[in-house]
């Protein structure tokens, strides 16, 4: 693979350290995490000490003050190693929960939470989705009612990543049910608040080592100082960070596609059938050539989006295009590569099988593929006017 111009020598040195950490501290425990349905709490502390969490958090709040590409390096290396559950958990923590606090929190909120999130002492989650509200966040029903100097939160959330292990959550609530999108607010909610309860650790078809949960808020009282941003401002805050979340999904999807092709080339170069290796057949070579070309095209586009993000030029439409293309390709590549493994590809001990089960969520998480198409098509027709 050609060197990628977007990364400097310092980025690549960091990549080497991340790769060593993954190999020594994470891969040996991966199967146990998959069986237990969550990461060990200790790995968060170790990852924090190694500098893998919240890489772009400013120095003033305990972070490295690095650029966003360092976050991308972590996502890529976890994806290359086949640790999709850990990748998703770290993504939610570093690229979503911590980013909301760093971007929209008060100085007191940043000083209190960000050093803990950088070190791994506090695990973050983002509680948006509800049983009746997924991509359409305006449909949420969880409410926060102002009572004096507090807000009282009541409702429930579902499919919340890091829900079983989180210490702090960014929770979307309705503060004015009559105001539509302008009636939604974000709150920082500590997991030890009275009235907060974790529900089931949900069983999924993939991402087994990432805990995903129901969460319940039974008149959880939080001080008004836990409001993130202004009351009624949640929707505008969410919109500004959706591009980053969707880019992160694209980054990991392209990395998995690259890994799946490599695994398949290695396997088909050794596995024999009908007197020759599977890799000797023209069908194998042509199919992998096609997938490799599509993945290279995706890599070029996603790298450009990463470069645009660094200079604050990544817009919602390009982020949607990157997510749509990369996640569709992700699912296609792991499916077609698995076929070359035959029965072995159906066994979870093989990385390609785990990649297959882990892939499907990428077309849903961060906004469903259909939502991405709506964003892109709306832009196409509006530009025509």
Image (cartoon, rainbow, N blue to C red):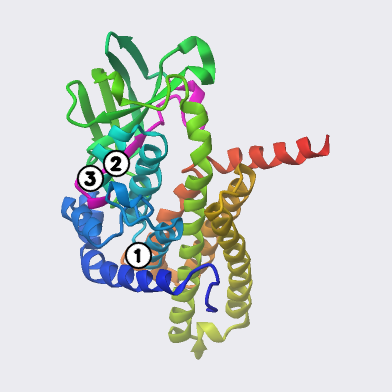
Q: CA distance from mark 3 to mark 2?
A: 10 Å
What residue lies at 52% left-to-right and 59% top-to-bottom? Answer: 330
Mark on residue 146? none
Q: CA distance from mark 1 to mark 2?
A: 33 Å
Q: Position of 303 compared to 147: left or right? A: right
Q: Choose between 149 and 132: the one closer to the eye.
A: 149
**Earlier residue among tags 3 and 2:** 3
Label 2 crowding class (10 Å Cα cut-off): few <14, some 14-19, many 20+?
Answer: many
Where residue 353 sits: x, y (%)? Answer: 39, 63
Q: Was residue 121 drawn as part of the magenta stretch in this picture?
A: yes
Discs 1/2, front: 2
Where residue 338 sits: x, y (%)? Answer: 47, 67
Element carrying mark 2:
strand
Q: Which span of residues is magenta-colored?
A: 118-140
Discs 1/3, front: 3
Element carrying mark 1:
loop
What residue lies at 26% left-to-right and 68% top-to-bottom? Answer: 21
Q: Which residue is mark 3?
A: 116
Mark on residue 124? 2
Question: Is 174 drawn above or below residue 355 in the view shown?
Answer: above
**Earlier residue among tags 1 and 2:** 2
Evaluate if marks 1 and 3 touch, with contact meaning CB atoms under 8 Å apart. no
């Amino acid at each position: 693979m050609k060197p990628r111009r977007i990364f400097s020598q310092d980025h690549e040195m960091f990549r080497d350290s991340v790769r060593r950490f993954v190999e020594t501290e994470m891969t040996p425990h991966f199967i146990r995490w998959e069986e237990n349905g969550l990461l060990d709490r200790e790995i968060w502390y170790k990852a924090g000490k190694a500098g893998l969490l919240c890489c772009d958090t400013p120095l003033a709040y305990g972070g490295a003050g690095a650029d966003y590409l360092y976050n991308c390096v972590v996502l890529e290396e976890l994806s290359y190693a086949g640790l999709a559950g850990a990748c998703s958990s770290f993504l939610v923590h570093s690229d979503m929960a911590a980013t909301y606090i760093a971007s929209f929190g008060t100085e007191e909120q940043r000083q209190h939470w960000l050093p803990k999130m950088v070190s791994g002492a506090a695990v973050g989650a983002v509680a948006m989705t509800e049983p009746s509200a997924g991509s359409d966040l305006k449909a949420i029903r969880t409410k926060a009612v102002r009572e004096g100097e507090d807000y009282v939160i009541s409702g429930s959330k579902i499919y919340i990543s890091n829900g079983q292990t989180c210490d702090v959550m960014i929770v979307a609530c309705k503060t004015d049910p009559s105001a539509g999108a302008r009636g939604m607010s974000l709150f920082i909610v500590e997991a030890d608040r009275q009235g907060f309860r974790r529900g089931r650790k949900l069983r999924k078809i993939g991402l087994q080592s990432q805990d995903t949960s129901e969460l319940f808020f039974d008149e959880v009282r939080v001080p008004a100082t836990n409001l993130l941003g202004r009351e009624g401002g949640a929707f505008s805050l969410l919109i500004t960070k959706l591009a980053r979340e969707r880019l992160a999904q694209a980054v990991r999807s392209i990395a998995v596609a690259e890994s799946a092709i490599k695994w398949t080339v290695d396997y088909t170069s050794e596995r024999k059938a009908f007197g020759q290796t599977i890799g000797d057949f023209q069908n194998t070579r042509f199919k992998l050539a096609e997938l490799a070309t599509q993945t290279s095209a995706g890599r070029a586009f996603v790298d450009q989006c990463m470069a645009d993000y660094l200079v604050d030029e990544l817009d919602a439409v390009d982020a949607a295009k990157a997510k749509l293309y990369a996640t569709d390709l992700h699912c296609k590549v792991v499916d077609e590569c698995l076929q070359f493994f035959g029965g072995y590809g159906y066994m979870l001990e093989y990385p390609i099988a785990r990649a297959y089960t882990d892939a499907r969520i990428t077309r849903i998480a961060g906004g469903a593929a259909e939502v991405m198409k709506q964003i892109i098509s709306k832009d196409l027709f509006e530009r025509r006017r």
